[in-house]
Image (cartoon, grey):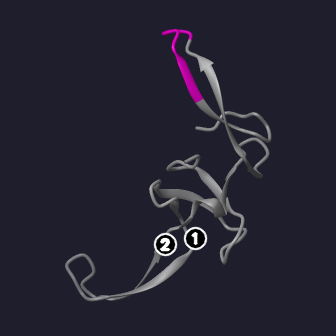
Amino acid sequence: MKIHKNDNVVVVSGNSKGKTGKVLKVFPKLNRVIIEGVNLRKRHTKPNQRNPQGGIVEKEAPINASNVMIMDPKANKPARVGKQIIIDEKTGKQKRIRVSRHSGEMLS
């Protein structure tokens, strides 16, 4: 999966199209992600110790990872993700890094 936790992404299809946010959680086996402030659902909760009042709580629901694209850090636009192999100077080992296909900028 090319999307990782804490990536800035934009929703490219679905009800939340055009919204941007930070990835809070990734479910690689289900190919789904939870994004901050996107795909909000209302949940009716009973009173408990954490929420003594109870009531209606808005919570983010997972959406399919194919509906989001990573934001290019340089151009601030949606971009596809590629992999690039670089050689670590200190150890001499190969490392795979994620890069933006749009600008070639390295992604965190």
Residue 98, located in which quarter of the rendered image? top right
Question: Which secondary structure, mark 1?
Answer: loop
Residue 94 magenta-highlighted: yes
Numbered disc total = 2
Q: Are marks 1 and 2 in contact (CB under 8 Å)?
A: yes
Of the image marks 1 and 2, the number of the one nearer the N terminus: 1
Residue shown at 49%/50% (left/top)? 5
Badge 1 local density, few (<14 within 10 Å), some, or many (20+)? many
Q: Is residue 44 above or below residue 28?
A: below
Q: Is residue 30 above or below residue 60?
A: above
Q: Amino acid at mark 2?
A: Glu
Badge 2 local density, few (<14 within 10 Å), some, or many (20+)? some
Residue 32, given in percent of the width and then of the height, sits at: 51, 62
Residue 24, given in percent of the width and then of the height, sits at: 48, 58
Give the Cα separation between the discs numbered 1 and 2.
6 Å
Q: Which residue is mark 2?
A: 60
Predominant SS along the magenta part: loop
In screen coordinates, is 95 left or right of 59?
A: right
In screen coordinates, is 85 left or right of 32?
A: right
Residue shown at 66%/78% (left/top)? 15
Look at the image and give the residue range highlighted in magenta.
Answer: 89-96
Q: Is residue 7 above or below residue 106?
A: below
Nearest the eye: 20 or 69: 69
Q: Amino acid at mark 1?
A: Val
Residue 19, given in percent of the width and then of the height, sits at: 68, 68
In screen coordinates, is 17 left or right of 50?
A: right
For the C terminus, give its image quadrant: top right
Rendered image: mark on residue 38: 1
